[in-house]
Image: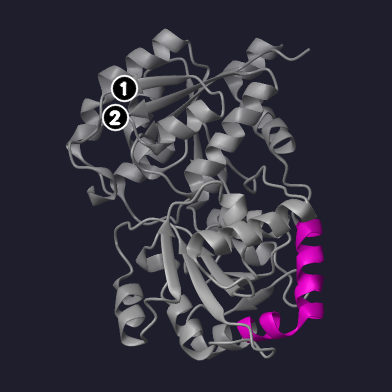
């Protein structure tokens, strides 16, 4: 029988992305493994709170960090993060936390001092790219362990962080039967008002500069139909966030794609929208991992992925996906055409993609993370 660990996961209530979804999957898996998990959200409402409640996770609401909403806030150190000390420190005491597990830089900055001043250990899940910042470096020094989501991300950390670091790929909990996939394909096309034989090229994630969603416009400009005559549409699922990818708007207008490049915003259930796609692109730069690609593979969707990121540690070019330089627009167009016009290639990529991510299950991920928790001095003594 395990000795339960009490873990607090802090978030900003009105910001949500792939890393948030990944961390909530981990939190749910830890709770199912018998640990005590608390989701702590700064601000009222917000998608994080809604998603946590839907997963059956207890939520403690804390004062907002800023009156500026969502992604309009600059992603840098702000005085409000210091002012959060009292509420955060009180939550650690009230909930009797053993671990404060942060999942983004804002929460790392905000919770480093409260955790350092308490008996709780700070674990920083590193889902970002390291850039010189006194506040981030100070917070990382306060962390007992740092968990990077890929070797790509880990290698960018300073040596003194790597010495207390580990690499753990994100887990996910999406799966779908063949019947469910066919049903999703039909329902999504009907919802969008598309022909039943329409082909969908998808990109999932917030529309920020780094994600390069505008590549979808370049692809659609050239690929209007498949070799067998089916019409090709684009599906860009995600929200507008800063720094916004203005090229997406500019190219959509310039190429006359308003009726073909569809932007439904955040979509739920995301697996239905992914399963409706014939291929999913991930043309981002500086991408630590990209959870959405792993989810697409689990659902049996062929993927084309940027070489600039941690996904190259999972994708074997031509075997379980295709790789492409993020700035090689003819390459993205050509590879998309290959997948759409070669059913045998698409089937091979889909089958091998499922195999490649089969081990990235939430329960195994939670076991490995709990092992990291137990390696910390305070918890190691407690377990003994």
The C terminus: image quadrant: top right
Part of the protein shown in magenta: 336-356
Disc number for residue 62: 1
The N terminus: image quadrant: top right
Q: Which residue is mark 2?
A: 43
| Residue 63 position within the rendered picture, expressed as x and y whole percent measured from the top left | 26, 24
Q: Residues within 10 Å of mark 1 (few under 14, many from 20)?
A: some
Tell me: residue 121, above or below residue 339. above
Image quadrant where residue 138 sits: top left
Q: Residue at x 60, y 71 (%)?
A: 305
Q: Earlier in the sequence, mark 1 or mark 2?
A: 2
Tell me: residue 244, above or below residue 135. below
| Residue 235 position within the rendered picture, expressed as x and y whole percent measured from the top left | 50, 67
Q: Secondary structure at mark 1?
A: strand
- 252 and 18: which one is in front? 252
Q: Is residue 69 visible?
A: yes
Q: CA distance from mark 1 to mark 2?
A: 6 Å
- 158 and 314: which one is in front? 314
Q: Secondary structure at mark 2?
A: loop
Q: Is residue 212 visible?
A: no
Magenta stretch mostly in which secondary structure?
A: helix
Image quadrant where residue 313 sits: bottom right
| Residue 265 position within the rendered picture, expressed as x and y whole percent measured from the top left | 41, 56
| Residue 229 position within the rendered picture, expressed as x and y whole percent measured from the top left | 64, 88
């Amino acid at each position: 029988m395990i000795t339960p660990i009490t873990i607090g996961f802090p978030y900003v209530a009105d910001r949500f992305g792939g890393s948030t979804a990944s961390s909530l999957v981990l939190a749910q898996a830890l709770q199912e493994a018998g640990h005590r998990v608390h989701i702590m959200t700064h601000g009222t409402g917000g998608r994080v709170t809604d998603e946590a409640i839907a997963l059956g996770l207890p939520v403690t609401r804390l004062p907002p960090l800023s009156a500026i909403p969502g992604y309009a806030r600059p992603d840098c150190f702000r005085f409000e993060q210091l002012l959060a000390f009292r509420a955060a420190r009180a939550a650690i005491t009230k909930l009797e936390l053993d671990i404060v597990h942060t999942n983004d830089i804002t929460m790392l900055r905000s919770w480093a001092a409260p955790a350092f001043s308490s008996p709780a250990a700070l674990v920083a899940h590193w889902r970002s790219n390291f850039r010189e910042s006194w506040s981030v470096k100070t917070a990382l020094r306060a962390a007992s362990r740092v968990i990077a989501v890929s070797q790509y991300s880990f290698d960018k950390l300073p040596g003194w962080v790597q010495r207390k670091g580990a690499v753990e790929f994100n887990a996910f909990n999406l799966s779908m039967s063949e019947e469910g996939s066919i049903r999703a394909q039909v329902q999504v096309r009907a919802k969008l008002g598309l022909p039943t034989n329409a082909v969908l090229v998808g990109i999932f994630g917030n529309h920020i500069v780094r994600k390069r969603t505008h590549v979808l416009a370049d692809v659609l400009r050239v690929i209007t139909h498949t070799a067998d005559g089916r019409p090709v549409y684009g599906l860009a699922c995600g929200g507008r966030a800063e720094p916004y990818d203005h090229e997406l708007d500019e190219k959509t207008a310039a190429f006359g794609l308003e009726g073909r490049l569809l932007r439904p915003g955040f979509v739920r259930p995301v697996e239905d929208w992914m399963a409706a796609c014939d291929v999913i692109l991930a043309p981002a730069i500086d991408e630590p991992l990209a959870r959405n690609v792993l989810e697409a593979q689990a659902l049996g969707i062929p993927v084309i992925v940027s070489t600039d990121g941690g996904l190259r540690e999972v994708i074997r070019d031509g075997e379980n996906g295709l790789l492409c330089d993020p700035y090689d627009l003819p390459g993205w167009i050509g590879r998309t055409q290959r997948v759409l016009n070669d059913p045998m290639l698409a089937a091979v990529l889909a089958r091998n993609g499922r195999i490649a991510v089969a081990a990235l299950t939430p329960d195994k991920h939670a076991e490995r993370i709990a092992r990291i928790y137990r390696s910390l001095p305070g918890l190691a003594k407690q377990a003994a």
